[in-house]
Image (spheres, helix red, strand yellow):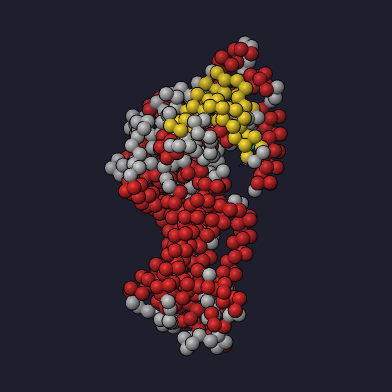
Amino acid sequence: MNPVLVKDLHYAFGDHVAVDGVDLSLEPGEVFGLLGPNGAGKTTTLRVVTTLLPAPPDTVLVEGLDVVRSRRRVRRLLGYVPQQLSADGTLTGRENVALFARLFDVPRRGRAEAVDAVLDAMGLSESADRTASTYSGGMVRRLELAQALVSAPRVLVLDEPTVGLDPVARSGVWDRIHEVRRANGMTVLVTTHAMEEAELHCDRVALMHRGRLRAEGTPAELTAAIGPDATLENVFRHHTGDTLEAGGMRDVRAARRTARRVG
Amino acid sequence: MSVLPAAPPAASAERSSPTGEIALLLRRVGAMCLVELQKLRHDRTELVTRTVQPALWLVVFGTTFSRLHAIPTGGTPYLDFLAPGILAQSALFIAIFYGIQVIWERDAGVLAKLLVTPTPRVALVASKAFAAGIRALVQALVVVVIALLLGVGMTANPLKLLGAAVVVVLGSAFFCCLSITLAGVVLSRDRLMGIGQAITMPLFFASNALYPVDVMPGWLQVINHVNPLSYEVEALRGLLVGTPARLGLCFGVLVIAAAVMITVASALLPRLAR
Ligand SMILES: Nc1ncnc2c1ncn2[C@@H]1O[C@H](COP(=O)(O)OP(=O)(O)O)[C@@H](O)[C@H]1O
Ligand SMILES: [Mg+2]
């Protein structure tokens, strides 16, 4: 069974089409990267997968469950880290994680141990009793991973997990993701607009541009098809005629306009 | 790494019986209320600074107007009359701020993360209502102490004090959920701030908090009839300083108003995450 299955997904905000016919089928245990510039529709796709945005029945399935009809059961299977740094700064690291343990019914017996274990796995044991407002960006991201992992999700959904982090913090985050995945076999669906990172850390990637997928495969397959020394950056340009930056700028402006109109 | 919890089976048991559903709801409300308490514990200075305003109302406005004898309170000293009104007002000012907090949580991604847990929306809203109630009770305590220092004759009957606490929590729950509802309608912090400011003062002045209903012009009396703040003040006055009050009616109005508002706010909450 595919941990995540998306069939011809369309999503529009008013008359602005954000996702325009996306198909995804993830394999158990893989790290699948959704790559594209700002405004490509990555976050919107993830928000449908995570039940935050509505989808027509039978277009999006998580572990075989429809995200619309079995919303609650799907949520039980997911760990989600949104794009913003979203740990609660007024709570300690431990309180942040314990909340999610309770919200996912981690049994009272062994709950404290589960919280400790996941904090330890994310390298946060030392700072667990400080309020999260004192954490660095990389620590907050690892805390959010701890929150998402304490329920032992089948599918971990990460939206730009390393954006805004320095290189050391980035590799810290990725190392933890790989360790946990090796240990418990969960599937990871991750978005990024950093092509080098995708090349390094994803088993398979899909390139997304203006709401559509333009190419899909392992990073090695995709780059080999373009040329001997090609990077995913070259692959992206080849399939979209666009650079990440160019795509990014235009869509950021569009997003600002939208924000003004909507906000 | 082996100590990390193992993944649950794909179709892990989802309780769908009505009792299971209620048990889940109660567990979630409990979990969310617990973090609200933890937040308050880390945020004690705010709890204190927020008591300055009600203190000023009582000490400055209250004592001055007592001397003027301008407001006919039917024999009750004006400070006694005013103290329950200020108590209700401070609860209102705290509660109306929760919609802004929810929008802030939306902008920070906190709300989205909570919405992707197996938690009924009503539990998220109910915990905010609870937190507003707890904050209001802390303030209420301060107001009561100041009032006692100023010589207000307050009841010492524990049942009446408990009743007053329930009234404060119900009123806070209503205004907190009203604020979350408005947040779910306007969706932006700036607009909500504007609306919050535009409605709190009218709610306050179109209530019996500062003066009795009889002295109001007719149109204001009409507004006063549909203003839950007035029922809150009437109940508090009856319980704390012993003025005549329709306690059954007041409790009824507050319970129904709070229940309706929690339901409406829960229905609008997912709009914020779109
Ligand atoms: N809440 C929203 N309302 C209106 N338009 C939106 C909203 N969220 C995203 N969009 C628009 O949808 C498009 C895709 O956005 P998004 O999925 O966030 O892209 P990405 O995550 O790839 O940067 C963008 O053009 C963006 O402006
Ligand atoms: Mg995004």
Q: Is residue A140 above or below residue B76?
A: above
> In x, y percent, where is residue A23?
55, 25
- Residue A170 percent coordinates (x, y): 53, 31
The foreground one among B103 and A192 is: B103
Q: Ligand 1 quadrant? A: top right
In the displayed structure image, the side of residue A70 where residue A246 appears, left or right: right
Give the quarter of the figure containing the N terminus of chain B.
top left
Tell me where residue B65 sits by quadrant: bottom right
Residue under the image location 41 percent in, 69 percent down = B251
- Is residue A249 left or right of B257 when viewed as pictured? right
Residue depicted at x 60% and y 24%: A213
- Name the quadrant containing residue A71: top left
Residue at image location 66% in from the left, 44% down from the top: A259
Q: Is residue B122 among what the camera can see?
A: yes
The residue sitting at the left extreme is A109
Classify residue A192 as left or right of residue A130. right
Q: Quadrant of residue B97?
A: bottom right
